[in-house]
Amino acid sequence: MTYILVTNDDGVHAPGILALVSALRQLGEIEVVAPAINQSASGHKKTLRQDIAVEKTTLEDGTCALAVSGSPADCIALAALGMIRWPPSIVVSGINRGANMGQDITYSGTVTAALEGAIHGVPALAVSLNNQQAMQPSDYENAARIAVKVVRKVLEKGLPPLTILNLNIPANGPTPAIRLTRQGVRIYRDELSAAGDIYQIVGPEPTGLTDEEGTDLWAVHNGYASLSPIHLDLTAHRFLADLAAWDITL
Ligand SMILES: [Mn+2]
């Protein structure tokens, strides 16, 4: 029996997770463990030696869920360490409000929750919806339908160790096709806002991109769903030989 663990970073009562749960239910049993409040851009945060509160809650459609005071990755870690049945057939994280492409991947709670699944040896998929325009419920339904297609394939094929899939879907579907992509490069336009000694990083949605064909940013910018395999090995392999030539000796 297929058993799917669903999480997100927008919080357990966000519309994206509801659409995802609703669509995935056709594939098997669902457990929902998600942050109690919005934890977007929390990165791969691990809450160590601090209390994490977990409360039962109910989604709008009556689905039972666990609301966690920790990070998205904490939700998966708690499940993996014995809070609920483990392992699931797959961890699915999303549907995030806003794309997670380029360097967003390291900021994203949506993606890092999926990475936490990979660390614990389970296949995982992150799903995000691009929000350059206002999003409709139908956008989440379209994204969830595409996610189901990818989940079916992962359940059939599995994924290599420490590897996840990162799925980004344009708003204002229908989406014509999925493009297999590599991680692109974002251009952020953040600004600093100061009031005395209190600062805020503010900015619009990161609209800048290097529009290089074959990247996640390129695909979504051109109306396609983007599917990237992401690996937890962050080594800059191509630089390793140059680094050796530095000849750092002790
Ligand atoms: Mn989010």
Image (tube, rainbow, N blue to C red):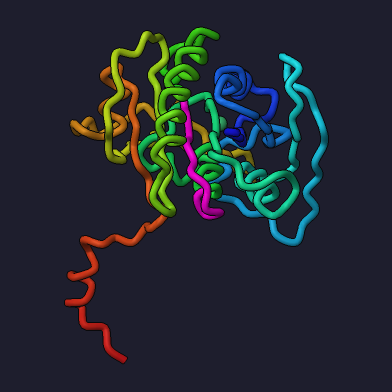
Between 10 and 1, the residue placed more toward the observer is: 1
Q: Is residue 19 above or below residue 192?
A: above
In percent of width and height, residue 137 lies at 55, 9
Q: Residue at x 42, y 35 (%)?
A: 156
Query: Farthest bottom residue?
Result: 250
Residue 51 sits inside the magenta stretch: no
157 or 50, nearer to the observer:
157
Residue shown at the point (26%, 83%) measured from the top left: 248
| Residue drawn 54% across the image and 34% down it | 92
Tell me residue 140's x, y (percent): 51, 15
Residue 22 visible to the viewer = yes
Q: Position of residue 79 (x, y in %)?
A: 68, 47
In the image, ligand 1 is in what quadrant? top right
Residue 193 appearing in the image: no
* Direction from residue 234 to residue 64 in the image, left or right: right
In the image shown, does 27 or 10 lie closer to the viewer? 27
Q: Position of residue 116 (x, y in %)?
A: 55, 49
What span is in magenta?
118-128
Q: Nearer the viewer, residue 5 or 98?
A: 5
**Vertical placement of 193 versus 13: above or below?**
below
Figure quadrant of the C terminus:
bottom left
Figure quadrant of residue 104: top left
The count of marks equals 0
State left or right for residue 216 relative to residue 151: left
The relative height of residue 24 versus residue 76 in the rendered view (above or below) is above
At 52% from the left edge and 53% from the top edge, which residue is drawn? 121
Give left or right: position of 133 versus 249.
right
